[in-house]
Image (cartoon, rainbow, N blue to C red):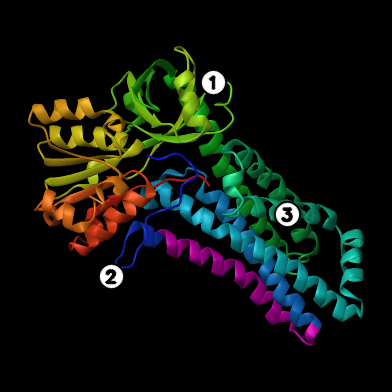
Amino acid sequence: MTRPGRPGPITGRRRLAPLRWSPQLAVRLVLTAWGVAVVALWWFDTAATGVHGAGLVLTAAGRVCGLLATYLVLLELLLMARIPVLERAVGLDRLAAWHRGLGTNVVLLLVVHVLLTVWGYGLTDHHQPLSELYTVIMTYPDMWKATVGTLLFVAIGAVSARAARPHLSYEVWYALHLTVYLAVFLVYFHQTSTGGEFAGHPVNRLLWTAMYVAVAVCLVVWRLILPVVAVAGHRMVVERVVEEGPGVVSVWIRGRDLHRLNARPGQFLLWRFAARGHLLSAHPYSLSAPPSPHRLRITVKDAGDHSRALAGLRPGTPVLAEGPFGHFTAGRARCGKSLLIGGGSGIGPVRALAEELATRGDDVVVVHRASQAGDLALGRELEVLAETGGLTLHRVVGSRHELGYDPLEARFLDAAVPDVAERDVFVCGPVGMMRTVVRGLRTLGLPDDRIHTEEFALR
């Protein structure tokens, strides 16, 4: 599992598959129906009063933009609320990708909402737009709160832009995003006090407020209460930190009744360590060994300030963890034959998953990719598994520049693993490597339901 800040799920050209019923499709339909219901509030109110004249048309369009923006904001919060039913149906990596994808739409809808509404009011009242904007902010109920909230959303959208993200540390980015809760709180009041769909419509106002409350309850329960309960119940602490190679460390965590987490090899948790620079934000790291009732292990490659600082953790440091999350597990392998390809820190979940698959008797092939021999972290553990007959191990060492080709392209994979088309394939590592492998596997005829990747990024 790679650290935050990487691109989202793997995509590529492929033939359109027939629409099939799935938990993910069910979630999409429910969320779409929710959005339709929100627009219906606007439609029924508009149909009842009618729209006549350019000013009212612009105002009506602005209102529907505001309703949709609010719906998407609440949906954004819900997607990252760690709700188990959503995570099982979709996967936290894809939920995070949906969350990122919706952010730009929220900001655009909010800006268009303000522009159209003020312009419409101005036309109706025969005022210039800037004069009307001043009047709205200064005289309409709760509008100053909405103005502050809108400016916060625009600011958060700006720092979330792809061009801005590399210039901000994850911790700063995370702290800025916490202001979303304040922004949501501030914009709520003007909706119920001045919104045409709610002023004079107590039932609509009650339903709208209930929607806010429901999302808030989900956040409090799954983002606050349950993690605190888990911390008290499992009492996890750092047991030791082991250097696995240049810039790669394994952190062993000791705790109580860890089997009750129901973590599977290949899954990840969101980790916080009670040490300077580690407590305020959670980072996703995968299990790199099968979990036991009293120990967990993560293996992390130096990819930034946070991952680099893990090497300095001291034994006894308290640990907070949320999860487990992810679908990169043996439950996805149904062929009895698996190919696991790992590179960089992606070898952690691959190593853990390989042991579980081998233990259950599957035919397992592992391809360990590294630019140089010193980067083959956990290599000795994979050797031991291979020596005991648990799996077949292929090491692919050398940069593409040195080799003159990419050894994970389709033709080389086919040569190294001739029956690759008969296997479930799990891929974890740097994004470029994963894209190359996935593209090659599709070229070799593997369907998407036998290609398993998990690239998780919080931003």
Question: Is 281 displayed left or right of 411 in the figure?
Answer: right
Vertical position of residue 457 compared to residue 146: above or below: above
Q: Which residue is mark 2?
A: 17
Vertical position of residue 302 compared to residue 5: above or below: above
**What's the residue at 25%, 47% (across, down)?**
403
SS of the residue under disc 2: loop
**Magenta stretch, main secondary structure class:** helix
Mark 3 vs 2: CB contact within 8 A: no
Q: Can you tell which quarter of the image residue 341 is in?
A: top left
**What's the residue at 87%, 60% (across, down)?**
137
SS of the residue under disc 3: helix
In depth, the one of 446 and 146 nearer the eye is 446
Q: Give the residue type that dot 2 points to.
A: Ala
Vertical position of residue 195 compared to residue 157: above or below: below
Question: Is 32 displayed left or right of 200 in the figure?
Answer: left
Mark 3 vs 1: CB contact within 8 A: no
Vertical position of residue 406 compared to residue 234: above or below: below
Magenta segment: 27-54
Q: CA distance from mark 3 to mark 1?
A: 35 Å
In depth, the one of 288 and 231 nearer the eye is 288
Percent x, y for residue 211? 61, 54
Mark 2 vs 1: CB contact within 8 A: no
**What's the residue at 74%, 56% (across, down)?**
150
Q: Give the residue type that dot 3 points to.
A: Tyr
Question: Which disc, if any, is residue 9?
Answer: none
Q: Which residue is mark 1?
A: 274
Q: Which residue is mark 3?
A: 188
SS of the residue under disc 1: loop
Please name which of the two marks, 3 or 1, marks the residue nearer to the observer: 1
